[in-house]
Amino acid sequence: VEVPSEAIDASEAINAASSKQTLSKSSSAGTTNIFVAVDGKYTGHLCLADVIKEGAAGAISVLHQMGIKTAIVTGDQRSTALAVAAAVGISPDNVYAGVSPDQKQSIIKQIQSQGEVVAMVGDGINDSPALATADVGIAMSSGTDVAMEAADVVLMRPTDLMSIPAALHLTRTIFWRIKLNLAWACIYNVVGLPVAMGVFLPVGLHMHPMMAGFAMACSSVSVVVSSLLLKFWKRPQWMKDAEAEQTGGLRWA
């Protein structure tokens, strides 16, 4: 009894046209086929499939709304990968199938060489090289320890795939806040320092030293308060609506 792989022995193991049609249909449905041969003759096959996680299509849709490109990089057969991509809304042009862990890493390097910033989501040992190579590695808490060690971000609720676009939205909000604080501090000091130094004293505009000290303290406090407002960040309403649509009205708080 042998269990040959499709890439090596499928052409020799499968002789009947009906068997080929059956395998083609099952692969198109998103299954991974394992062939069984007895004495070198095709006897049957097993079809294995992973259930697509609830909310996967919604998370992909939200990422597209955010202007983020998505792709599938997998070791599964191409027909299986294409079926999954079609189910979640990923373009077939962005499907990389039948790749090894080293090839996953090479694909990420290739995309990075095109000037793209790459975030990789994975949970297996074979994903760890790609997670370490990506600009941002995202692992699931339900994944392997090796993957979590290689990742930059670990999602503590692996069933909530909407956490991925939510995390990216939060990072954008944080960087926007950093730029806002920097711009505010520059404008505040450019306007306030000349007044406090008495540059405009000849025209009657001046500031008492105690008032200048208070104004300087207010500059620092305002930046700190602005940063603390990030604690009140919540997922935007359009993201919640997309999540509720995919989960039938149920969503994480």
Image: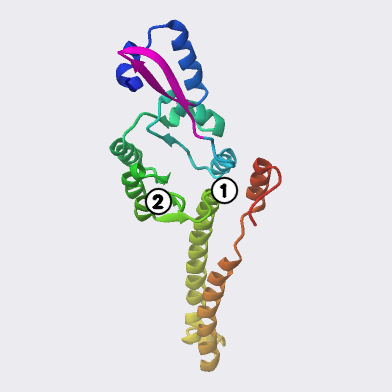
- In the image, residue 14 lies in the stretch drawn in magenta: no
Residue found at the far right of this picture: 249
From the viewer's side, name the closer residue of 178 and 52.
52
Residue at 48% over, 39% down: 69
Q: Nearer the viewer, mark 2 or mark 1?
A: 1
Q: Closer to the N terminus: mark 2 or mark 1? A: 2
Residue at 49% over, 72% down: 185
Compared to 209, does 181 lie above or below? above
Numbered label attached to residue 136 = 2
Q: Are marks 2 and 1 in contact (CB under 8 Å)?
A: no
| Residue 3 percent location from the top left of the image | 34, 23
| Residue 14 percent location from the top left of the image | 38, 11
- Name which residue type carries label 2: Val
- Name which residue type carries label 1: Met
- In the image, residue 42 lies in the stretch drawn in magenta: yes
The residues colored magenta run 31-50
Secondary structure at badge 2 equals: strand
| Residue 153 percent location from the top left of the image | 43, 55
Numbered label attached to residue 74 = none
Badge 2: few (under 14), some or many (20 or more) residues near its Cα, within 10 Å? some
Q: Is residue 126 left or right of residue 221?
A: left
Numbered label attached to residue 162 = 1
Most frequent secondary structure within the magenta stretch: strand
Secondary structure at badge 1 equals: loop
